[in-house]
């Protein structure tokens, strides 16, 4: 199945429960908006493109669960639920963007039955479009890799971070389909180990040779010539760096991405960001992007076992900013770009048929 989709039989959202990996591959049904919000915050569903689909289906779910005496009251209730979904995680732009995509369909409706039909159709279109974009993105990025090369990746930017196929790992899968033998070095990605728990599962299922390393070994691997390229995804890309980064763009991705980019730059390893255009935010500067801070117990505990004294002060950011000067290539569904980049470039690309 896809990472997230609509279950027609139960009339709700069904998703792969990524909190259970690698021990169990199972699904979770979000039948209410609180259940969906909790699933997003707990990372049952995660990854910017998959969160976009979650946001889209969230509006459809709200459209089905709400009732009201008038359509205006109904639309207000759906919009309030949609806002709670959009705010469940603040850094990934796709979540709020796709919520708005489906809400725009709601605003064009005049009856509750019409709203329910059109919001679900729009959400399904969002999910289908994500798969198509990522397959095109993968094909574009595969051209950067040669047979026999080894890619390092960070966190999980594969099929389970999207509706299907993946972004960073989608590049690997497309290269594999083109007949290239590509190996992957996967950073474990502390503190929740998305690299070890999720990326390795995906790659083994697709018969891709994968080696898991502790995060702190990535520099050594590059120093010893074990890495031909670093390929990562993105949760938000801004083209305006704000006061801190100036006129260069910034990539917001899983915490630790910046460190990988610095190491890659130091050792002459190409650093590649693979992300669809929906992840590019042309409206905000880096100063306006909120970096999510997560529960301190993600560091104080490891799978329920105390890892630090209770009450230890914790700084647990989920993402970090990587300035575009450290990025060699940005791969999207419309092509491969070499920074520096500007808004005009992306607006033109969005109008260009794939």
Image: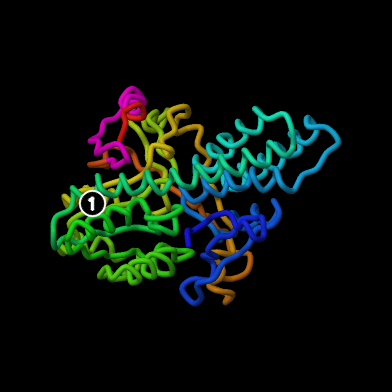
Residue at 28% over, 62% down: 218
Residue 286's spot in the image, x, y percent? 44, 33
Q: State the colouring used for the structure image.
A: rainbow
Which residue sits furthest right? Answer: 69
Q: How many marks?
A: 1
Residue at 31% over, 45% down: 137
84 vs 105: above or below:
below
Q: How busy is the neighbourhood of tag 1: few (under 14 within 10 Å), some, or many (20 plus)? A: many
25 vs 279: above or below:
below
Query: Which quarter of the rendered picture does the C terminus lie within?
Result: top left
- In the shown orientation, is residue 245 left or right of residue 180? right
Residue at 47% over, 29% down: 284
89 vs 295: above or below:
above
Q: Tell whether position 337 is magenta.
A: yes
Magenta residues, as a range?
330-348
- In the shown orientation, is residue 88 left or right of residue 152? right
**Helix, strand or loop for disc 1:** helix
Residue at 32% over, 64% down: 186
Q: Tell whether position 263 is magenta.
A: no
The quarter of the displayed image where residue 69 is located: top right
User: Looking at this view, is 208 or 312 the one in front?
Assistant: 208
Q: Which residue is mark 1?
A: 264
The quarter of the displayed image where residue 297 is located: bottom right
283 vs 294: above or below:
above
Residue 103's spot in the image, x, y percent? 62, 34
- In the shown orientation, is residue 252 left or right of residue 100? left
User: Looking at this view, is 72 or 250 the one in front?
Assistant: 72
Residue 238's spot in the image, x, y percent? 41, 34
Which residue sits furthest top? Answer: 344
């Amino acid at each position: 199945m896809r990472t997230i989709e609509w279950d027609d039989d139960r009339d709700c959202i069904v998703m792969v429960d990524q909190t259970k990996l690698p021990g169990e591959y199972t699904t979770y049904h979000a039948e209410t908006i609180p259940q969906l919000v909790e699933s997003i915050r707990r990372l049952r569903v995660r990854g910017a493109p998959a969160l976009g689909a979650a946001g889209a289906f969230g509006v459809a779910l709200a459209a089905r669960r709400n009732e009201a005496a008038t359509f205006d009251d109904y639309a207000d209730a759906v919009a309030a639920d949609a806002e709670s979904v959009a705010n469940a995680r603040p850094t990934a732009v796709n979540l709020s963007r796709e919520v708005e995509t489906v809400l725009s369909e709601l605003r064009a409706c005049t009856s509750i039955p019409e709203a329910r039909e059109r919001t679900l159709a729009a959400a399904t279109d969002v999910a289908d479009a994500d798969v198509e974009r990522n397959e095109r993105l993968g094909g574009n990025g595969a051209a950067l890799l040669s047979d026999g090369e080894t890619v390092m990746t960070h966190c999980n930017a594969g099929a389970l971070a999207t509706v299907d196929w993946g972004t960073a790992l989608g590049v690997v899968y497309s290269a594999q389909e083109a007949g290239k033998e590509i190996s992957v070095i996967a950073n474990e990605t502390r503190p929740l180990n998305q690299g070890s728990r999720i990326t390795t599962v995906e790659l083994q299922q697709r018969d891709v040779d994968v080696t898991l390393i502790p995060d702190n070994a990535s520099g050594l691997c590059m120093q010893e010539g074990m890495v031909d390229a670093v390929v990562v995804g993105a949760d938000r890309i801004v083209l305006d760096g704000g006061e801190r980064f100036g006129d260069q763009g910034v990539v917001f991705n899983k915490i630790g991405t910046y460190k990988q980019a610095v190491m890659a730059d130091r050792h002459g390893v190409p650093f590649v960001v693979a992300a669809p255009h929906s992840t590019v935010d042309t409206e905000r500067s880096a100063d306006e992007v909120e970096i999510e801070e997560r529960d301190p117990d993600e560091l104080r505990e490891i799978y329920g076992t105390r890892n630090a004294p209770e009450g230890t002060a914790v700084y647990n950011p989920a993402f970090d900013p990587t300035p575009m000067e450290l990025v060699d290539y940005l791969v999207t569904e419309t092509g491969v770009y070499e920074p520096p980049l500007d808004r005009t470039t992306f607006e033109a690309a969005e109008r260009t048929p794939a």
